Image (cartoon, rainbow, N blue to C red):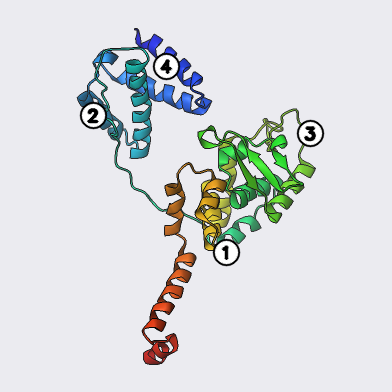
């Protein structure tokens, strides 16, 4: 099978498997990069050749997470050739082979930084968009794709259709998020599109705002306040605040749309307030059992 035909068939296969258009575009892009680089027939690619390709990507200064995305698309393509097209070959990517990644803890905003950020946001549209991230945990692409039909103001809730992993989920509106959304909808220009958030100025005025457009607005406010803040940090902030308020991990997982509880558990490591409360409660009980009191320690320090 010619490589061009194989990629076309693979694209159709991904569509039948209900992969999102965004994922398919990324897979096709990374496959094209690989095919243009490799200098042997695609069915003759070995693990050693693949390691050379990884070196090539590292030389281009791609980060390990991006390289793993390349490996995922190549791995999927070869699995398709072997299992669907019955091509007789050895899979060039060993099972489970990925580059080791650092796992930085989620970064969140302190209360005073949240207040500083929203104090400079005058646009009703921008306030509504960022309030949905802060209070509802929406991802930036979920905000960009939010439709009018998905919002239920009376019940103070909305449905995120086809979020990450193409999964739907129900999220709830806090009072301030509801107020921000209502205030924007009152001034939202009439439009044929059912997407909620529209471009307000320039040649694209009235069209749906893009993910990059939303990110640029956040970058503008970050410069204005001097804060190091991103859209995704607002989502991290919501998770941390809920955990500090003793919300159940499974509840937070459901609200954020995490497929694995392990992802949600990472917020336990940055929830300093909860750790501090748990520590003092537990250590207080330990001290009581040993006949000690905190006031005794205080007097000792004096």
Along the viewing direction, whichever of 126 and 94 lies nearer the viewer: 94
* Residue labelled with disc 2: 51
Residue at horizontal 42 percent and vertical 71 percent from the top: 279
* Nearest the eye: 215 or 150: 150
Q: Is residue 296 above or below residue 277?
A: below
Does residue 109 sit above or below 257 in this rendering? Answer: below
Mark 1 lies on a secondary structure that is helix
Tell me where residue 9 appears, x and y as whole percent: 43, 13
Lower sequence index among marks 4 and 2 = 4
Tell me if label 4 and label 3 are in contact, CB under 8 Å.
no
Whole-percent x, y for residue 273 in the image: 49, 66
Tell me the quarter of the image containing the C terminus. Answer: bottom left
Instruction: State the CA–CA distance, disc 2 to disc 3.
Output: 54 Å
Counting residues from the start of the chain, the first of labels 4 and 3 encountered is 4
> Is 202 left, or right, of 41 in this rendering?
right
Outermost residue, top side: 1
Distance in Å between CA atoms under marks 1 and 4: 50 Å
Question: Which residue is identified by label 1?
Answer: 112
At a point 54% along the width and 49% down the height, the residue shown is 235
Q: Earlier in the sequence, mark 2 or mark 1?
A: 2
Residue 227 in the image: x percent, y percent?
52, 56
Q: Residues within 10 Å of mark 1 (few under 14, many from 20)?
A: few
Chain-order first, disc 3 or disc 1: 1
Circle 4 residues within 10 Å: few <14, some 14–19, many ≥20 = many
Q: Which mark is residue 190?
A: 3
Q: Earlier in the sequence, mark 1 or mark 4?
A: 4
Q: How many neighbours does mark 2 have within 10 angstroms: few (below 14), some (14-19), or many (20 or more)?
A: few
In the image, farthest residue toward the front: 289
The residue identified by callout 4 is: 10
Of badges 2 and 3, nearer the viewer stands 2
Residue drawn at x 59%, y 38% as measured from the top left: 142
């Amino acid at each position: 099978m010619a490589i061009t035909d194989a990629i076309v068939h693979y694209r159709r296969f991904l569509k039948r498997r209900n992969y999102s258009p965004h994922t398919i575009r990324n897979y096709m892009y990374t496959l094209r990069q690989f095919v243009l680089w490799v200098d042997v027939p695609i069915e003759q690619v070995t693990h050693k050749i693949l390691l050379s390709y990884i070196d090539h990507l590292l030389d281009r200064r791609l980060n390990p997470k991006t390289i793993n995305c390349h490996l995922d698309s190549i791995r999927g393509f070869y699995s398709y050739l072997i299992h669907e097209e019955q091509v007789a070959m050895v899979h060039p990517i060993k099972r489970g082979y990925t580059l080791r990644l650092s796992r930085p803890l989620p970064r969140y905003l302190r209360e005073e930084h949240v207040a500083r950020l929203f104090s400079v946001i005058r646009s009703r549209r921008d306030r509504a968009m960022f309030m949905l991230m802060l209070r509802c945990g929406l991802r930036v692409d979920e905000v960009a794709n939010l439709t009018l039909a998905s919002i239920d103001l009376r019940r103070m809730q909305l449905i995120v259709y086809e979020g990450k992993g193409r999964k739907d989920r129900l999220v709830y509106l806090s009072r301030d998020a509801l107020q921000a959304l209502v205030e924007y909808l009152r001034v939202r220009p009439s439009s044929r599109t059912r997407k909620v958030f529209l471009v307000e100025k320039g040649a694209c005025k009235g069209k749906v705002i893009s993910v990059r457009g939303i990110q640029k607005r956040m970058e503008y406010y970050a410069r204005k306040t001097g804060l190091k803040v991103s859209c995704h940090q607002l989502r991290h902030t919501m998770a941390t605040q809920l955990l500090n308020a003793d919300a159940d991990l499974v509840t937070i997982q459901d609200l954020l749309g995490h497929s694995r509880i392990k992802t949600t558990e990472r917020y336990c490591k940055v929830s300093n307030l909860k750790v501090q409360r748990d520590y003092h409660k537990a250590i207080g009980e330990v001290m009581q059992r040993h006949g000690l009191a905190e006031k005794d320690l205080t007097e000792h320090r004096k």
